[in-house]
Image (cartoon, rainbow, N blue to C red):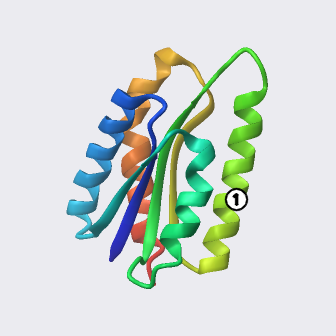
Amino acid sequence: MKIVIICGEFHKDEANKMIDYAIDEAKIRKCEIVNIIKIPGSMEAPLALERALKKDSIDGAVVLGIIEKGETKHGQVIGQAVTNSIIDLQIKHNKPIGLGIIGPGAKAEHIDSRLESHARSAVNAVYTMKE
């Protein structure tokens, strides 16, 4: 199975850890990572995903990132919009997408403990849903 990893880098150190966990899980599942696309934040995920899924050489995708809790509802709005777009793209392209975005509403003190589980779960979701 050939997959692409898309990761928001707003939290760069944490994003790199998530990518490493996803790569490790992809190796375990014998998935080939065709590309790793780093984007500024979760907001840019749907466009990067659309571009990746158009390619016949891609069987699925993993979307990683963090939407931290802020003082306004901005993160919730972005999180809902991004999630809805990802679901729409999954159906449009009939290719599985593993959603590994922590949040919205993640508190800083809870992010590190979720990096590995979210990244690995996203890869497993894609692998499980392969045809």
Q: Is residue 68 above or below residue 88?
A: above
Q: Residue 48 placed where, x, y %? A: 53, 59
Instruction: Say which residue appears at 67% left-offset and 77% top-offset.
Output: 92
Please rate how many residues cluster around mark 1, counting C-alpha atoms within 10 Å: few if below 14, some from 14 to 19, many from 20.
some
Residue 24 in the figure: left or right of residue 122: left
Percent of width and height locating residue 100: 49, 47
Q: Position of residue 67 (x, y in %)?
A: 59, 32
- In the picture of the structure, the residue carrying the numbered disc 1 is 85
Residue 43 is drawn in which quadrant? Answer: top right
Report the quarter where the C terminus lies.
bottom left
Q: Amino acid at mark 1?
A: Ser
Q: How many marks?
A: 1
Nearer to the camera, 49 or 19: 49
**Side of 23 relative to 80 (left or right):** left
Q: Name above or below for residue 99 compared with residue 111.
A: below
Residue at 77% from the left image edge and 37% from the top image edge: 77
Q: Is residue 56 above or below residue 11?
A: below
Q: Is residue 100 left or right of residue 119?
A: right
Q: Residue at x 68, y 41 (%)?
A: 79
Image location of residue 108, percent across then percent down:
51, 17
Classify mark 1: helix, strand or loop: helix
The quarter of the rendered structure image containing the N terminus is bottom left
In the visual, does 79 lie left or right of 48? right
Q: Is residue 42 above or below residue 12?
A: below
Q: Residue drawn at (38%, 36%), measured in percent from left and top?
A: 15
